[in-house]
Image (spheres, helix red, strand yellow):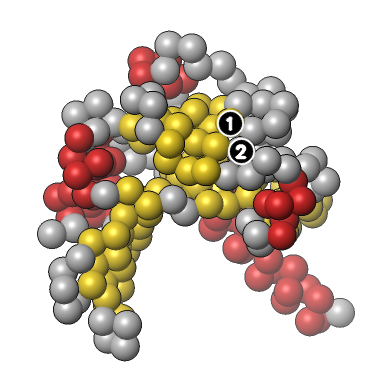
Amino acid sequence: MKKVFVYLMVFCAIAVFSQDSFAKKYTTADAISKAVKITDDNFKKQTVYEFPIIDYQKVDKKEKLQYIPDYKDPNLFFKNNPLVYQIVAIVNQKTGEKTFYLKFSFYFDAGAGFYVEQIYDSNGNQIYKGFSNFEDADANHSFISTYLFEGIAKVNKTIFYCNPTVTEQYLKDNKDTGIVLKVYAPKEDVYLHIPSYYIQAVLDTVK
C-alpha cells in the first residue's frame, strides 16, 4: 500500500510539472533565452539547446487572430488537450554544423485515431510529410501512450509526435513574422504560430 501511494505521488508530481510547464508564458525573446536548457555531450561531441515547451492552446486568442485571421478554436481532438511545440537545436562540436528541429506533440484521447497527414507553412513550404492512414503512423512508432492526472482521476491520453528539421536560413527568413503553420489531419485541421520573438531567441542563443 505504501509503495502504491509513493508511485501515485510521483505520477501526480510529473503530471503537475508537465501541466505547469505548458502553462508558462514566454512573451519576449529574453524570456525564451533565459529558459533554454543547454547540454554538452562529450561522447557525441554535440551541444543540445532545448528551448521552452509552449502549449498553443494557452496562447491568448487575440494573438492567434493577429497572425491567423482564419483561426478557429479546435472542437474535436484538441478541444481540451495540449497542442505543443518546441524548437531544439543541436550543434556539432567538431564541425559547427547546426540542426534545428521543430518538435510537435499532439495530445488526444486514447482511441481517437488521430494522426498528422501533413504540415505546411503559410508560404507553401511543406514542413512535415506525415501519413495517409493511422496504421502507417502506428507502424512508424509515432505515438506515445501516457497518463495524466486531472484532480484525482487518471485519464488515458495518447501523443502523436513529430520532429521535422528546418535550416538556420529558414529561421532567419521567418524571424520578423514568425512561422504560421497548418496541421492537416483527418476530421480536423489545426493552426499553430511560432512567434518572431521565439525564433529570434533561438538565433541569438545558438551561435
Q: Which residue is mark 2?
A: 117
Residue 92, image x, y percentages: 23, 72
Q: Quadrant of residue 14?
A: bottom right
Q: Residue at x 36, y 15 (%)?
A: 66
176 with respect to 64 (left or right): left
Q: Residue at x 57, y 52 (%)?
A: 161
Residue 170, image x, y percentages: 25, 41
| Amino acid type of the residue that numbered disc 2 sits on in the rendered structure | Glu
Q: Which residue is mark 1?
A: 184
59 with respect to 111 (left or right): left
Mark 1 or mark 2, earlier in chain = 2
Relative depth, front residue between 17 and 195: 195
Q: Quadrant of residue 172?
A: top left
Label 2 Cα neighbours within 10 Å, binned few <14 / some 14-19 / many ≥20: some
Label 1 Cα neighbours within 10 Å, binned few <14 / some 14-19 / many ≥20: some
Disc 1 to disc 2: CB gap under 8 Å = yes
Relative depth, front residue between 73 and 182: 182
Q: Residue at x 29, y 60 (%)?
A: 99
Residue 201 drawn above or below residue 205: above
